[in-house]
Image (tube, rainbow, N blue to C red):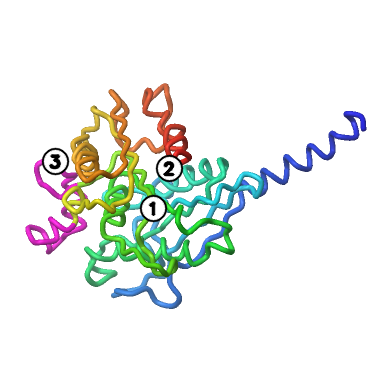
């Protein structure tokens, strides 16, 4: 067969790969009304850059890898935004598309924010949504062709706090559809602690609300909740992050190491905060984190 005859086949295969790499579907997180709903709004309230300011209905968007690239691994992505907004584009969908192109099924979580006008017990609601999301991923394992023991979570900033909270408070279960503990964590410039000395004050105040200065501060200081069976973690931070000090990642990594849990931490000279995937010109070497995380995931 000559090269001209092979060309249409090659083009078809390339187009098929591209279609699957970009295939996505959006699903409601709950059937019917979400738990702890206090008041309903008709549609999401959006801000600049597609940021979600108020969530009408918690949902997940699933990005499916091409079948010939699928690894059987999955990642739940929790975008950040200080628990006030959700930076769902550059810390959600853009990241999901990248991992999907590299064979990992990725799921972007649009979680409810701790808005006391919309939900009851607002300090519990984001974590409840994250637990429900990872259970939903495992419940669809056969349909989505993933391994229920290779489901991780990734979070940025306050979404990193949500991902870390899920990692330490998720409940394991032999029933995959009830198992809310991730198998690994990727935490990018995360808020880790509610310790007033080095937390992100905005995230702390918005999440805890009337529960400030209560036992909830310890509950949501995730570095204090690490156990020997906590999931391994990959952490990224920059020394010049003035919004969320690098101390957050450091104390979490130290707690994991002290409990014998596999951890890898990258502290970069510059990068600042809120860069998503980043770029070399603006953020320096921190923009390499996606490739570094992919290698780490493959080695688990």
> Which residue lies under the disc numbered 2?
300
Q: Quadrant of residue 246?
A: top left
* x 39%, y 46%: residue: 48
SS label for mark 2: loop
Left or right of 115? Residue 18 is right
* Element on which disc 1 rests: loop
Question: Which image quadrant for residue 130?
Answer: bottom left
Which of pointers 1 and 3 lies earlier in the amino acid sequence? 1
As rendered, which of 151 and 9 lies closer to the eye?
151
Q: Which mark is residue 279?
A: none
Q: Secondary structure at mark 3?
A: loop
Answer with mark 1 or mark 2, whichever residue precedes in sequence: 1
Q: Position of residue 278 (x, y in %)?
A: 41, 32
Q: Does the residue at mark 1 contact the one at mark 2 (Cβ under 8 Å)?
A: yes
Dot placed on the residue nearer the N-terminal end, 3 or 2: 3
> According to the image, label 1 marks what residue?
183
Residue 65 on the magenta segment = no
The part of the chain drawn in magenta is: 193-219
Which residue appears at 42% of the width and 65% of the height?
Answer: 135
Check the image and report above or below for 242 versus 45.
Answer: above
Q: Which residue was labeled with disc 3?
A: 198
Instruction: Locate the N terminus by quadrant.
Output: top right
């Amino acid at each position: 067969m000559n090269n001209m005859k092979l060309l249409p086949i090659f083009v078809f295969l390339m187009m098929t790969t591209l279609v699957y790499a970009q295939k996505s579907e959006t699903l409601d997180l709950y059937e019917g009304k979400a738990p702890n709903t206090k008041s309903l709004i008709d549609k999401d309230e959006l801000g600049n850059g597609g940021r979600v300011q108020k969530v009408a209905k918690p949902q997940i968007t699933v990005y499916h890898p091409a079948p010939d690239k699928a690894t059987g691994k999955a990642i739940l992505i929790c975008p950040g935004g200080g628990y006030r907004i959700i930076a769902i584009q550059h810390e959600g969908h853009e990241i999901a598309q990248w991992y999907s192109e590299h064979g990992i099924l990725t799921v972007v979580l649009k979680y409810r924010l701790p808005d006391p006008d919309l939900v009851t017990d607002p300090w519990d609601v984001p974590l409840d949504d994250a637990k429900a999301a990872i259970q939903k991923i495992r419940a669809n394992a056969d349909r989505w062709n993933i391994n229920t023991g290779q489901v991780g979570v990734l979070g940025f900033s306050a979404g990193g706090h949500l991902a870390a909270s899920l990692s330490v408070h998720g409940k394991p279960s032999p029933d995959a559809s009830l198992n809310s503990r991730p198998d690994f964590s990727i935490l990018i410039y995360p808020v880790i602690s509610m310790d007033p000395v080095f937390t992100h004050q905005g995230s702390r105040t918005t999440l805890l609300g009337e529960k400030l200065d209560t036992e909830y501060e310890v509950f949501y200081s995730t570095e204090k909740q690490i156990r020997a069976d906590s999931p391994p973690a990959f952490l990224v931070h920059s020394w010049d992050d003035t919004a969320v000090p690098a101390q957050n990642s450091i104390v979490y990594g130290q707690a994991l190491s002290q409990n014998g849990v596999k951890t890898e931490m990258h502290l970069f000279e510059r990068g600042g905060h809120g860069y998503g995937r980043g770029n070399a010109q603006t953020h320096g070497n921190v923009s390499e984190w996606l490739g570094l995380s992919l290698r780490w995931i493959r080695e688990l």
